[in-house]
Image: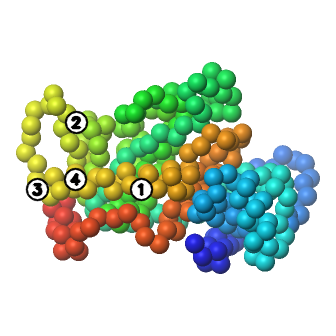
Amino acid sequence: MDIVALFYDLDNFVVTFHPQFNRPLLEDGKRHRKRRGRMYLSEVMTILILFHDSNYRTFKHFYLHYVRKLLRGEFPNLLSYNRFVEQIPRALAALIGFLHTRLGRCSGISFIDSTSLRVCHNMRIHSHRVMAGLAARGKTSVGWFYGFKLHLIINDQGELLNVCFTPGNVSDQAPVPRLTQKLFGKLVGDKGYISQALFEQLFVRGVQLITRIRKNMKNRLMLLWDKLLLRKRAVVETVIDQLKNISQIEHSRHRSVVNYFTEIIAGLIAYTYREKLPSLAMRESDIEQLKGLAV
């Protein structure tokens, strides 16, 4: 990842975002100092995103052994590790806004899926306090977990179209209407999205939900292109695998709710900067034909 290009994008965004974000905030009637800190907000955001493109497993080792030793020239006003951790919460709103600028465009072919985000081991559920009241127990195809669910939609080029977080006990179908507000064409999902009511709701808005059928369901006719798209559904699972194993959006070392979601958003942004994203191995003529069938 090019540090200069990343910082350039973030700094240009912060210059516009920060004044607009602070303008409508309510005041508490007290006088507050508005001194600028040693590090710019764009610098803090850059370091947070760089961590998710590194090979370090913990942010502490990344900051102490890589940033403070090798990136002194790029960040001349570095803070101590403890002071930098205190600055992380103020980057959450800006990172969320910047993530929206990194979302791709719908091409008429989209894939939807969800994945679990564990916040602790199942043996420590009763003693876990950081996410108490927010996280919940859920179940996936591999078993029970305690934490959240990440719901995401990608296009045929592997670009993120929309994401959202829910507690672990929320159904995969619940956030679909909100996630698909700006979509059109075909939306491919797994068997967890089988619902006649959901299919009809999306179909009225110009979105055709394509899923496999369960063993106890009657067989139905399906277009050949729809069957081919179902075979390509693994592309969204590849994206999830990269988010978890490369961007490291899932781990149980957090001690702050705000920092937890800040790290996840930074990991999603780091994914959008990858040079090569998982995509469909299809010709442009095939994509155009699929778009025609989706009308």
Q: Residues within 10 Å of mark 4 (few under 14, many from 20)?
A: few
Q: Nearer the viewer, mark 4 or mark 3?
A: 4
The x, y position of residue 57, in whole percent, is 63, 52
Q: Nearer the viewer, mark 1 or mark 2?
A: 1
Asked which secondary structure carries label 4, the reply is helix
Residue for badge 2: 196
Residue for badge 1: 239
Q: Nearer the viewer, residue 204 or 287?
A: 287
Residue drawn at x 56%, y 45% is: 250
Q: Nearer the viewer, residue 56 or 118?
A: 56
Q: Residues within 10 Å of mark 2 (few under 14, many from 20)?
A: few
Q: Mark 4 or mark 3, which has the lower sequence index?
A: 3
Q: Amino acid at mark 3?
A: Leu
Q: Is residue 22 left or right of residue 103?
A: right
Q: CA distance from mark 3 to mark 1?
A: 25 Å
Residue 34 picture quarter: bottom right
Q: CA distance from mark 1 to mark 2?
A: 27 Å
Q: Residues within 10 Å of mark 1 (few under 14, many from 20)?
A: many
CB-based contact (under 8 Å), mark 4 and mark 3:
no
Q: CA distance from mark 4 to mark 3?
A: 11 Å
Residue drawn at x 42%, y 56% is: 239
CB-based contact (under 8 Å), mark 1 and mark 4:
no
Q: Is residue 241 left or right of residue 48?
A: left
Q: Residue 224's mark?
A: 3
Q: Residue furthest top?
A: 126
Residue for badge 4: 231
